[in-house]
Each structure stands twice: as C-alpha cells, then as structure tokens.
Image (cartoon, helix red, strand yellow):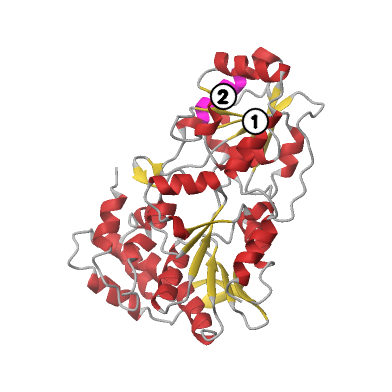
Amino acid sequence: MIDYLYIEKKLNTIHFVKLQFCDCGTSLETLFSEINQLSKESTPFLFKKLLSCNITNGYKVIKKNKGKIFLLFSNSYAGRKDHRNSFNQVANLASDSLTLSGENSVKLKSAPFNFLGLIWLIQLFPISFPLSYKLSVCIILSRVYLDYSFIKSQIDKNIKNIELFVTFFDCAPIDYLVVCYCNKIKIPTSTLQHGLYFPYDDGVVNIAFRNSPSKYFLSYGEWTNQQAAKVGINDKKLIRLGCPKHINLKIVDTKTPSQKIFGVVLEGLAQGKKINPSNTQLINIANEFAKENNLQYILRLHPNDHIITYKKYIDYNYCVKIEDAKHNVSISDFISEIQFALSNPSTAVAELIYYNKIVYILNQSEHQFEHMNDFAFDNCNLLCKIYKQHQQVYPTQQLTEIKNKFFEPGNIAGHYSKFFKHFI
C-alpha cells in the first residue's frame, strides 16, 4: 500500500520555484492516485509530456461592481454539476464580486516549452523517489500551476478592490495554492463546505480539516463545528452559515409517497480504492430487506462511482431503477420517488433528513452520527425491527431535531449575505 502521507511530507521539504509560499505536497494530496497511475508510463513518454505545452480548461470571469468578494470555482471540480449549482447559489448573493468559474468553452495554454517543470524536476533530485514518479509529480503540478497562474493574475489585477476570497473547497490542488497566495498577500480567505466531514478518515485527521489553509471555514452548522473541534480546529475559524444547496430551497413534505419504494444511497470510493465493501454490504441487505417486506428500491450511485462495480450484487427482482448521481443534478427527484432510504454514514444521510426522509444507517458507529443511533443497523433483522417501529409511530420531532443539528436553521441566504456584508 502506498504511503501517501510520507510522499506528502517529502514533497513538502522542497521549495518549488514560484511556489515557495506553500506546501506543494499538501496541495497535491488529492491527486496522488492520479500521479501514481501516471508514473507507470515509460520514462520517454513522461519526459515528452512534461516538456510539452499544457492546455486546460479556462475560466469565465464575471465582475459585479468593484469586485470586493473574489469567488472561485476552479477546474479541480468543474465537472461536478451539483457542486457548480451549490457554488452559484452562494456567488449570486455577493452583490459586489468578481467570480471565476471553470469552463470547458475557454482554454488556458502554457508556453511551448515547460522550463518551470524541468526546474522542478531538478529540485526533486535529492528525494529518493523513482524518476517516473518525480516526472509525474512535475507533470501534474504543471497542470495545476497553469490554472493557479491565471487566477493569480486576476487577483493581482484587482488586488486593490478585493476584501475577501471565497473558494468552493480549499483542499483541492488549485484552490490550495490560491488560498496560500492570498494568505501571503493578506487577503482574508474562506472556504465553503461541500459535504459532511468526519473528524477522522482511516485513522488520519480528515483532509478537509487537516489541510485547510483558509482563515474562515463556512460550515453547515452545529454538527460540523463539533467534529472540527475534535481535531483541534479553532472555533474562530468556524462560521456557521448553513448548506449552500439549501439557499432559497422550498421543501415539499414527501414523507408518505404512495409507492412502497425505498432508496439505497451508495457512498464514494476512497483514494486508490476500486470498490467500497460497505456499499456491497448495503446492497446485499437491501435485497434481503426488500424481499422480507415486499418492497422495491431505487439505487443511487455516488458521482465518483460506476454501476459496473456493483452490478453483480444487485437483485433486479427488487431494484427497479439505478440513478447515476453525476448526471442527476438534484436529489429532489430521487426524494420524491422514495418512502425512506438506506445509506452508509455519509453526506447523503443529512441531505435526506433535510427533506424529511427517514434514513437508516449501516455500520453507524458512536463516533459518527451520535445523534442518530436510533436509526442504525448492521443486519437485516435489526433493520426490519426499526422499520416496523417507525411504521407505527413516525419520528417527526426527532427528524426535525436531527436536521437542525446538521444544518444551521433559518434564512440560509440571509446568513451568507450578512457574512459578505462585513467585507463590503
């Protein structure tokens, strides 16, 4: 197994030219799997790729008034329509802003010969990585740098007006570099939250807390702040504003649809993994549970997963539909089709609760959703028992309390607008 934290630590000892103000190993952490895969190519191929011209998607620039709030939706995640929609909800609230949004309709192009990448390769010589790995690091860093340099140019051009920098996720490679640069030149920085973050991931502090360089973390609410506190995040960094997806969202009470159909929501894959064992266990229990209770289910894939991975585990006598979340932007259609849902401990749990849906959680531990132990199961028999209890008495009040713990209640648009006004 590759020790990515060791790689990160070694890369952080190198003061890469033009990026001396930040830890480049940390900036690349979410791309280590891609770097590892690329390093399997031949050395001549990698040299040619490093020294050749880089072309990536560019950015759409929208300026309103003086541009005091600089908002970034980078190419690190520009392919996620759900993320783009969340970001746009926040960006629309900033009346005096400059917004950069990754777009495939425009392109960024580097110089014909990548001198900087070659310099970085020379800087890596003292580290005992294979040459193919060093080349791969420089190739990926060159791609990230191309985005960073354009965004930096927009910041430098408008530096006199910028009072606050806001990015979608400050641990993504491009965003991390830009936030560190803004910190260097004394522009206050902030990051949105795009999912529920547990304090630890495989025994290591969650990357969203561990690597966040922003001054402000704009959190969903009380639960997130409690998790951040467990790993030592300063309370002054955490600003409870609510979930961007919920800005101007009107909820329709859909807790009793006519059809006896439930949802099964899969979680994403960890970096470097090909299958999630919890997902296969969840599908197996869903098959058994549907058979026991004369029900059917809709399977919803994580945006970063593919149906081929789990096809052999699905019993099509009970699975009536498979939804690819990557191409189904809104969860509302999914919500309207199901009576309740089964899920692993993930962001999907909170989203479904927000829509007044019961969610039963597989392999829930006391260190995850502590306030949802009454909805936890680890086998079909226990799930059937809890389900029948809720068929008799629907837990309306309990769901409301859970929802308000996950998400800051009140006017979410108002919360974000008020925060922005401090800098305008």
Q: Dividing the picture into quarters, in which one does residue 351 lie?
A: top right
**Is residue 34 at all visible to an observer of this figure?**
no
**Position of residue 15 measured from the top left corner of the image (x, y, whole percent):** 27, 72
Q: Residue at x 36, y 71 (%)?
A: 50
The one of 242 and 203 positioned closer to us in this rendering = 242
Q: Earlier in the sequence, mark 1 or mark 2?
A: 2
What residue lies at 66% left-to-right and 77% top-to-bottom? 96
Residue 325 position, x and y percent, is: 64, 45
Q: Residue at x 68, y 22 (%)?
A: 318
Query: With 331 as the anchor, is 48 left or right in this view?
Result: left
Q: Which residues are magenta?
A: 279-288
Check residue 398 in the rendering and tell me which mark sits there, or answer none. 1
- Badge 2 marks a residue whose secondary structure is helix
Q: Is residue 319 left or right of residue 182?
A: right
Name the quadrant containing residue 61.
bottom right
Image quarter of the C terminus: bottom right
- The count of marks equals 2
Q: Find out whether residue 282 is within the magenta segment.
A: yes
Where the N terminus falls, by quadrant? top left
Residue at horizontal 66 percent and vertical 48 percent from the top? 409
Question: How far is disc 1 from disc 2 in space, using C-alphas?
Answer: 10 Å
Residue 14 magenta: no
Q: Residues within 10 Å of mark 2 (few under 14, many from 20)?
A: few
Q: Does residue 208 sit above or below 278 in this rendering? A: below
Say the numbered circle drawn on residue 255: none
- Residue type marked 2: Asp
Residue matched to label 2: 374
Amino acid on which the number 1 mark rests in the picture:
Gln
Q: Main secondary structure of the magenta part?
A: helix
Horizontal arrangement in the rendering, residue 148 relative to residue 391 (left or right): left
Labels 1, 2: front one:
1
- Callout 1–callout 2 Cβ contact below 8 Å: yes
